[in-house]
Image (cartoon, rainbow, N blue to C red):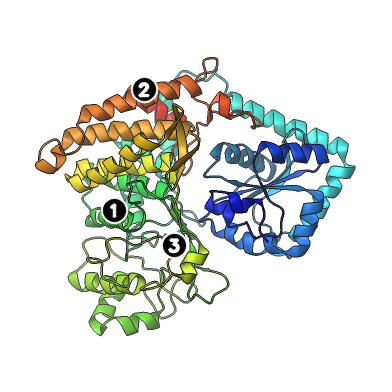
Amino acid sequence: MVNRLARSQSLYLRKHAENPIDWWPWCDEALATAKSENKPIFLSVGYSSCHWCTVMEGEAFSNSAIAQYMNSHFLPVKVDREERPDIDSIYMQALQMMIGQGGWPLNIFLTPDELIPFYGGTYFPVEPRYGRPGFLEVLQAIRRFYDTEKGKLQTFKEEILSNLQQSAMLSGNAAELNREIFQKGLELNTGIIAARDYGPSFPMMPYAELALRGTRFNFESKHDSKQVCTQRGLDLALGGIYDRVAGGFHRYTVDATWTVPHFEKMLYDNGQIVEYLANLWSAGVREPAFESAIAGTVAWLKREMTAPEGYFYAAQDADSFNTSEDAEPEEGAFYVWTYTELEQLLTAEELLAIQEQFTVTRSGNFEGKNVLQRRHPGKLNATVETALAKLFAVRYGGNPDTVKTFPPARNNQEAKNNSWPGRIPAVTDTKTIVAWNSLMISGLARAAAVFGNVEYLALAVKAANFILDNQWENGRFQRLNYDGKSAVPAQSEDYALFVKALLDLHQASLTLATGEAAQQLPNSEFWLTKAVEVQAEFDEFLWSDELGGYYNTASDASGDLLVRERSYTDNATPAANGIAIALWCA
């Protein structure tokens, strides 16, 4: 038996459609029901390619005892953060206030009348482990607190709401911007990229990009900024975070050595990394691994992440099935290799060449298997390239020259039931997200200009034209598209990043104006005109006349929000207001 989420367009929500939990999507009816029944809202936010979201779905959210208690004592609501980043932003900030850290799945409890959070966490196991209580125990304690500690609850609500409101106000009394403050900002960003910590390694592309752009000012610094930026490029292009066999970058690595990734591939990371590596090349860092990583990522994009209509899919899962009989997918199964497999697939010469260039051993570097992390920069020799092509064939059922397109597995059922010529692929979330498509358009446009590659530009142009032709409904820009149907009003990041993408197409078109292939594409002035039109709509619906800056959401699309934020801090993607400032100066 399925729940309400079975009717959702979101792949993430549909993954929870067979849970025994009586999930609601975020909607007016759900909020009204919670209020009328005086049930605290259990809000769970995640996304389709999130590994720990998948784990919790298969464990706690599929547990009958937990579901029975949840359905009786809470109003459970599921949100896809990729559909509603505004909701995710508010409650992630609240969680960080509560426990000092965040992550997904974001699981947080709200009062039913005011939607104010009062307790939260990320992954909750079914049974106590990892130093965390079992989820049923958490639910019972939260409901007991809600029913019996009204005074404490009120005090906590007031504190959280006050902090959220203060954060959303962004005081306008900041010191005047000057060269010293600008230099401190660059130093801070460069320091973040320079850090070699013991924890996970994230690309942090907005920080890396700013540090790279800052190298031209020649500020005195405790860091060698150019070297720091070059090292980040090498970490990306040589590390296990890059899929050397088939192209594309994984989300992050779980270690400080850039070896073992969390295997999901997100469009937004790949767009930013392509742009960054192209900018490094343009800055004079002519490392062959950068050029080949860009080419490999574009090949992956064309083969697996581009719809026939020209837009780009959102993400691929970290987990995949080894066989169609498996009950649950396994993390990284599509991407890793046992030493025995490599011995069977490769000649002795090829295996030796692979071992010389990559961290390949009998014991492996990931649960007895091998993630291919390069040992050295430079160009790979023909023997290694032949070996990699053989591994590609095992995955995809053909060599890279013949497998130019590879259909997505849109859900677990398709992944398990389709007859794949190679390994069972990870599920692909095929929705269109304007902001993420824009990041990839910008990356392709920049790489096209730097390497003189009209093919990259043509790919970007087709995606941009899809957005221009399909993402307006009743005269308003829309954030998502599900199989040809636009949905969800655009947010500030969609506006800002799409305007940037249009301007980047304008610049690339100017650079590549000559040649027969380039002349078949729209002229540069077309992109400039469209950028001005989208910017005007951005100004009309999201600009704050009273406070300055752009709200995350338009006034007529934010009535269900606890506070109305104007995000300004870069995270995995650049803040919309930061991009908007650059657009004003363009």
What's the distance in space between the residues labelled 1 and 3, CA to CA?
Answer: 20 Å
Amino acid of disc 3: Ala
- Are there few (<14), some (14-19), or many (20+) residues within 10 Å of tag 1? many
**Drawn side of residue 146 relative to residue 347, left or right:** right
Residue position for label 1: 298
Depth check: give the residue in front, 251 or 282: 251
Q: Quadrant of residue 180?
A: top left
The residue located at (52%, 45%) in the rendering is 82
- Are there few (<14), some (14-19), or many (20+) residues within 10 Å of tag 3? many
For marks 1 and 2 on the same chain, the one whose residue lies earlier in the sequence: 1
Q: Can the viewer see residue 218 in this picture?
A: no
Q: Quadrant of residue 301?
A: bottom left
For marks 1 and 3 on the same chain, the one whose residue lies earlier in the sequence: 1
Amino acid of disc 1: Val
Depth check: give the residue in front, 93 or 285: 93
- Are there few (<14), some (14-19), or many (20+) residues within 10 Å of tag 2? few
**Drawn side of residue 432 relative to residue 37, left or right:** left
Where residue 151 appears, x then y in whole percent?
A: 87, 35
Residue position for label 2: 584
Q: Quadrant of residue 222?
A: top left
